[in-house]
Structures are given as C-alpha cells and as structure tokens.
Amino acid sequence: MKINRHIIVFDAADLDAESSFWAGLLDGTVKAEDDWHTVSVGGEPRLVFQLAPDHTPPEWPDGAPQQIHLDLYIDDVAEAHEQATSLGAKLLKPADDAAAESGFQVYADPAGHPFCFCWGAG
C-alpha cells in the first residue's frame, strides 16, 4: 500500500474561526468551501476543517474527552505563546518551568481542540 498524502481533519462548529486560527499559527492560507476549509502551508494542504454544527469541545484534562491533539515543536516559547493567544488560543496548562531545557504547554484552539507547544528533546 502506498499513501500519497495524509491530512488531519478537525470537526468545528465555526469554520472561519477554526481555519483562520490555524492558518495564522502555521503561516498558511485558507481555501473555504461551504462546509470544508483547507489550510495550506507552502502550497501544500496541511489541515482540513469540516463543519460539525453540534461539535462539543473537549474539556481538557477532565470532562468531554479529546479525540486528537497536535504536538508542535517550537524554538521560542514566549513568541509561540503570544502568537497563539493573539489568534484566539486559550492556555490550559502552563509549563512547570518555561525556562527548562525541555517541556510543554497545553492550549485549546477556538473550537476547544487541545494542542501542545513542545521544546527540547522530543
């Protein structure tokens, strides 16, 4: 079997908010259709968002469970935090020590999907 391409698809009730957030965070562009938005980075599709009007956001760490999350490895924690929160992310769990050689912080995107900024050994 040969897989030619893989795409991660998120459910979201507000496609504009969700796709704009991820396009801003990944420095990408949005191609919007009625019930399907694609975020491309460098001309390549990276994430897709499908309309799910009844989407229930996960409640991390307890409550409605997450279905998936992304780990994004970054170089500058403060810069990544500022960009994500300015785009609408919510900090769910700060790092135990943001100055440590390695660590992570947990965020939620506008639809409530958790993701992590990670640094150091991965």
Image (tube, helix red, strand yellow):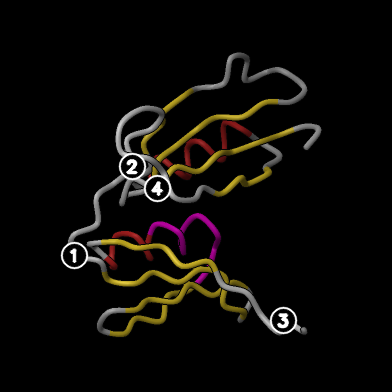
Q: Is residue 23 left or right of residue 46?
A: left
Write the start and end of the magenta stretch as one range: 21-28
The span from disc 1 to disc 2 (Cα, nearest Å) is 15 Å
Q: Earlier in the sequence, mark 3 or mark 4?
A: 3
Identity of the residue drawn at 41% across and 81% down: 31
- Disc on res. 58: 2
Q: Which amino acid, mark 3?
A: Ile
Where is the N terminus found, in terms of image quarters? bottom right
Q: Earlier in the sequence, mark 1 or mark 2?
A: 1
Q: Earlier in the sequence, mark 2 or mark 4?
A: 2
Identity of the residue drawn at 25% across and 83% down: 34
| Residue at image mark 3 | 3
Give the image location of residue 42, x and y in percent.
64, 75
Neighbourhood count class around disc 4 (C-alpha, 10 Å): few under 14, some 14–19, many 20 upward: many
Neighbourhood count class around disc 3 (C-alpha, 10 Å): few under 14, some 14–19, many 20 upward: few
Q: Is 13 drawn above or below residue 2 in the view shown?
A: above
Q: Earlier in the sequence, mark 1 or mark 4?
A: 1
The span from disc 1 to disc 3 (Cα, nearest Å) is 30 Å
Disc 3 versus disc 4: nearer the observer? 3
Identity of the residue drawn at 55% across and 29% down: 105
